[in-house]
Image (spheres, rainbow, N blue to C red):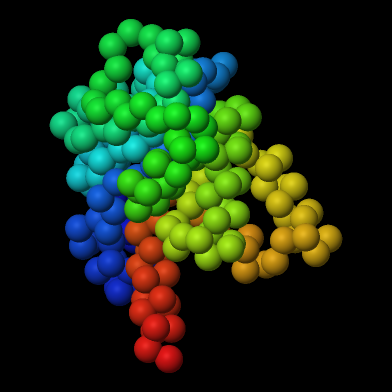
Amino acid sequence: LQRQGLPSFLVFVLAEHSRFKRICVFCGSSQGKKRSYHDAAIELGNELVARGVDLVYGGGSIGLMGMVSQAVHDGGRHVIGVIPKTLMTPEISGETVGEVRAVADMHQRKAEMARHSDAFIALPGGYGTLEELLEVITWAQLGIHHKPVGLLNVDGYYNSLLTFIDKAVEEGFINTSARRIIVLAPTAEELMEKLEVHTYFLTLNLNLNSRV
């Protein structure tokens, strides 16, 4: 891991065992046009395995969803796929790895994924990925959960979204503190390290506030 230049206490934080047991990954059921999206999904899966973290995701076996889940499963970690019954036929193709949990609808799917996860990461994706990402960001803003939200910005895929969010902050629709909910990085390794540090300080802050 590349930790040169980090303060010694942060090196200590990162040297500890991962604070996450399971991470929820949002991503596309398509592969996208760039090879880098494919590679990023596999790299994220491998990074979760290296840190001993299990995967929670939307239950598909195609596109980026299939790639990240296969990488985690091949690495020996547990995979939980949560999918509405109405989507099981068109969304699952081939052999789905890990544990599949069928739910009634999309709302229950998101609630179930959130319930089983310690953090959230979004890879590139479409409408569904964006909707899932923005919902967990909103939940964090409202204090519904205190779990970190990571954005894997592969080749600047989410730059336009970040520009929109910054514009919303500038125009007074999003608080500056809420902008900091998003933990951003271009690679899986860097994002995981940032999430580890973020959750360390988040937990520390929550513990301090509980004593006031």
Residue 69 in percent (x, y) is at 32, 27
Identified at 42% across, 38% down, the residue is 25
Residue projecting furthest to the right:
171
Can residue 25 be seen by looking at this rendering? Answer: yes
In the image, taking residue 86 as reference, residue 193 lies left or right, namely left
In terms of depth relative to the viewer, which is nearer, 141 or 121? 141
**Relative image position of residue 98 (x, y in whole percent):** 24, 26
Q: What residue is drawn where x is 51% and y is 45%?
A: 151
Residue 206, given in percent of the width and then of the height, sits at: 41, 76
Q: Is residue 120 above or below residue 108?
A: below
Q: Seen in the image, is 140 located left or right of residue 24?
A: right
**Residue farthest along the bottom direction in this orientation:** 212
Residue 65 visible (yes or no): no
Residue sitting nearer the eye, 108 or 67: 108
Q: Is residue 2 above or below residue 80?
A: below
x and y, in percent, of residue 56 in the image: 34, 38
Specify the farthest residue to the top: 94
Q: Which residue is drawn at 51% across and 32% down?
A: 106
Residue at left offset 48%, top offset 18%: 86
* Residue reaching furthest to the left: 76
